[in-house]
Amino acid sequence: MIAKYIRLLGILLLLLTIGPSLALAEAEDNEEENIYAKRMALFKKTETLTQIPWYYFAAIDNYERNMLENEEEEKVVSISLKPEVWFGAGNIASIKEQEIIELFNGKGKDGNGDGKADPDDPEDMLYSFANILLEEGPTRDDIKIALWNHYKRDLTVQTIMNTAKVFKRFQNINLTDRDFPVATGYNYSYNNTWGDRRGFGGLRIHEGTDIFADYGTPVKSTTYGVVEMMGWNLYGGWRIGIRDIYNIYHYYAHMSGYEEDLEVGQVVKPGDVLGSVGSTGYGPPGTSGKFPPHLHYGMYKDNGKKEWSFDPYPFLKKWERMAKNK
Ligand SMILES: [Zn+2]
């Protein structure tokens, strides 16, 4: 009898300690889902007002969010316009009446009909940005030109257009799934070799992780994204580059070949087979077998100004766990 009470007491204490943290985690999850739902509602509302498909807004917003350097508090919408663009160059007092802004050739508009064109209001910001896009026209090519006029950078335009393609395909902006780049049912091994020195072709720093596996082991996309690059490269052999929706370029090298029908511009998702492990590279097209078969996997971040390589190893460890728990 007493033992039963002690057991009950134990369970009760356990519930008291676990309960609140579970509730907190759940609330955080809900909050995260909420922000995606809020964004989606805003994007669709702006589509209704402007006829520009929602996924372009989603892609621009996503790009801007991924360019932020410090971990600021997550805003509903990260798209922004410079104050002088919003208010107009001569509107020093930052008057928010749309008529005044127009007098100063500002681009700020009142999207939600509250009488003010407020750059801190996400609806006003989206609507204003949409109108900048509409200056060129509503088609895909028009949007591309408008984006180029705004950002003046090819890679930025390409990234946004690719991300829009991904969002359109999956009809979802909350795409957090990932996979390991080598099929985990096969034999493979890898260590953290990022930054090691390489001899061939001058001293280069090893920008990636080598995952050793047998010839023919499936190579899979780790992320949602678009195939940006395919073909032969002197060092990489048969390689493939995928730009994901977080301004990150994923580089797969030394493959023995590509999955049939895979092509540049194609949308991929985590787990999609790209090809298989090989030992190509370090010579003219077709060179193979100069080193043991392995997948070289690299990651490059773009911040809107430059791209740089960073260590994929911690991410691979995480995605490996995710893949094995599927
Ligand atoms: Zn490598």
Image (cartoon, rainbow, N blue to C red):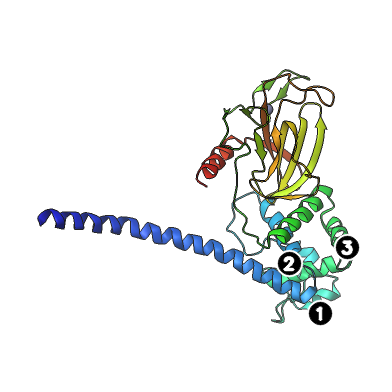
Q: Secondary structure at mark 1?
A: helix
Q: Secondary structure at mark 3?
A: helix
Q: Residue furthest left?
A: 1
Q: Secondary structure at mark 2?
A: helix
Q: Quadrant of the N terminus?
A: bottom left
Mark 2, other Cα within 10 Å: few <14 / some 14–19 / many ≥20: many
Q: Whereabouts is ligand 1, in terms of quadrant? A: top right
Q: CA distance from mark 3 to mark 2?
A: 15 Å
Q: How many marks?
A: 3
Residue on which disc 3 sits = 142
Judge depth for marks 3 and 1 and give the one in front. 3
Tag on residue 54?
2
Q: Is residue 215 above or below residue 227?
A: above
Judging depth in this view, the residue of 34 and 67 nearest the camera is 34
Badge 3 or badge 1: first in the primary sequence: 1
Badge 1 or badge 2: first in the primary sequence: 2
> In the rendered structure, which amino acid carries the disc numbered 3?
Asp
Coordinates of residue 54 in the picture (x, y in percent): 73, 67
Q: CA distance from mark 1 to mark 2?
A: 27 Å
Residue on which disc 1 sits = 99
> In the rendered structure, which amino acid carries the disc numbered 1?
Glu
Query: Which quarter of the picture shows residue 99?
Result: bottom right
